[in-house]
Image (cartoon, rainbow, N blue to C red):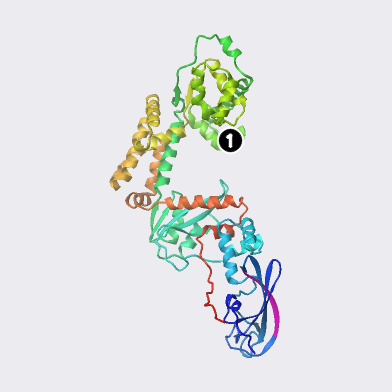
Amino acid sequence: MAIAKSHSQSVLPNPRCLVLESIEQSDDNFLLAVHVEQVPSCPECGRPSHSRHSSYLRRLQDLPWQGLTVQILLRVRRFRCRNHDCPRQVFTERVEGVPSYLRQTSRLAEIVRVVGYSPGGLPRARLLARLAIRTSDDTVLRRVKAPVTPGANDPIEILGVDDWAWRKGQSYGTILVDLGQRSVRDLLADRSAQSFQAWLQQQPRIRVISRDRGGIYAEGAELGSPAARQVADRFHLFLNLSAAVERALEQHGHELWLRDPMPDQTKGKGEVAKSRTRQQILQQERRHRRFQRYEEVIKQYRQGYSLKKISAMAHLDRRTVRRWVRAGAFPERQPARPRPTQVQRFEEYLRRRWGQGCHNATRLFRELRDLGYRGGRSMVARQVARWRKDLPPLSALSTQKITPKQAAMLVTRSGARLTAEQQALLDRLSKQCPALRQLREFSGEFRAVFQKREEEALHRWIVRAKNSGIRSLARFAAGLQKDFSAVIAAVETDWSNGQVEGQINRLKMLKRQMYGRAGFVLLRARVLPYVPLRTLHYVAVAA
């Protein structure tokens, strides 16, 4: 005789075939005894069976009630398959809403997956415990890593591809973004033309592929989707131009010093030497040793040794050797910028009080405390000690070194985006370094090509750059000519890798959130868009 269905029956995962027998409540949970009433079918052949073999109990966790955990004690039956042609002789009846081999119902497993999708395992396990959903961090991660392919049946037409770093300079992966849908389509564990080609062959409807200037993705796109139009990313084009300008300016490093008014020259050499601190003496000794190594590298380079051989003999990184060789003069190290202190927030007030004649550091410290200053007196004393020696409030150097990278950023930036201070700095540098004017002219013309969207203008720019006599700029132009079809597509179309770069930033955030300990499967699951698993929704059954 079937048990009459109650209101509690309607909250079961599948009230159509699950029957509630009893409810027991303890201090921290509800225990529901449930059995199944249905005519089961063999999962292999689909034939119904009434021949019962045995039964067993399953303990399942379900959605909480009134802040208490709910445990379902489900009695599941085994049946014999009477189809002699079926390879399975005994089977366990399936219940919709109750997955096989899980200790959670489908709806609870989906909530665990949703909660674990954003923050990860252990933090979400703590939150779920507060919600009366008891589960471990490993279970949360297993739910997040459930194999789901988002948009597997949705065709993709506009694809953006770029690499991302597992460990910068050592191992990289590939991110694939649907630019039309503005979402990540897939993540590849490596950066190779072969894996990219294999992925593209499964996407026959791709029309446009936006990529960086690297040859790996160009080769993979050519082999995996030859009909698609490749577009070189504009950001990477201007980044490559900036790198070429930087290499060109490395040979003019001695012209990038800004001469400021020198300190008072009336002091004797003995007095200057006497004022040197121990730290300054040690800095001078380190500079002397570095200068000796620089001279040794240049001497070996002039003797015909390769950069690789010089790097091994001098025990220096090859990039350091290349930078020294290209510099044309000894590259001075830029002095470290002092970290801002708490007292600098009140510098305007200190200047005003100093001008009014208050030169007592303790008194100034007490006044700042009333204004909200939380630092110590020594910081205030150090700030005003420089003023006691009649030095400027901000220590000024006799010369200021502008690095080639800083100068290249000014050269390649559009005039509309330069501040008044940056424009003044660029004008000063142009007077001291004539080559900078020529590089600025080439940069402006290259930017105008993309603004006007003229193929012929790009042709003219490449020819001029190759004949400019600037080796780094000529190499950049040769690279553009080699990849001309993708570059001209960047000029004519609006597609770029801006979305891809944003998704890479999100990937980095997720990777750091897991302290770099996430495997590829978990990282891929959290980077891909969330897709809910199929869950069942039933109408409540009245009593």
Question: How far across and how far down the image is residue 334, in percent?
Answer: 52, 28
Q: In which image quadrant can residue 370 be found?
A: top right
Q: Secondary structure at mark 1?
A: helix
Task: Indicate the amino acid at tag 1.
Answer: Ser
Question: Which of the pair 292/392 is nearer the observer?
Answer: 392
Residue 30 x/y as whole percent: 67, 71
User: In the rendered structure, does residue 140 fall within the stretch colored magenta?
Assistant: no
Establish if 270 lies above or below 283: above
Q: Is residue 109 left or right of residue 399?
A: right
Q: Looking at this view, is 413 or 331 the one in front? A: 413
Which residue was labeled with disc 1? Answer: 311
Q: Position of residue 199 (x, y in %)?
A: 48, 62
Task: Evaluate whether residue 26 shows in this view.
Answer: yes
Q: Which residues are magenta?
A: 54-63
Which quarter of the rendering shows the C terminus? bottom right
Quadrant of the image occupied by residue 57: bottom right
Does residue 289 sit above or below 210 in this rendering?
A: above
Does residue 396 show up?
Answer: no
From the image, give the main secondary structure of the stretch colored magenta.
Answer: strand
Camera-side residue of 211 and 184: 184
Estimate the x, y position of residue 188 in percent, counting from the top left: 53, 58
Q: Residue at x 68, y 68 (%)?
A: 29
* Quarter holding residue 189: bottom right
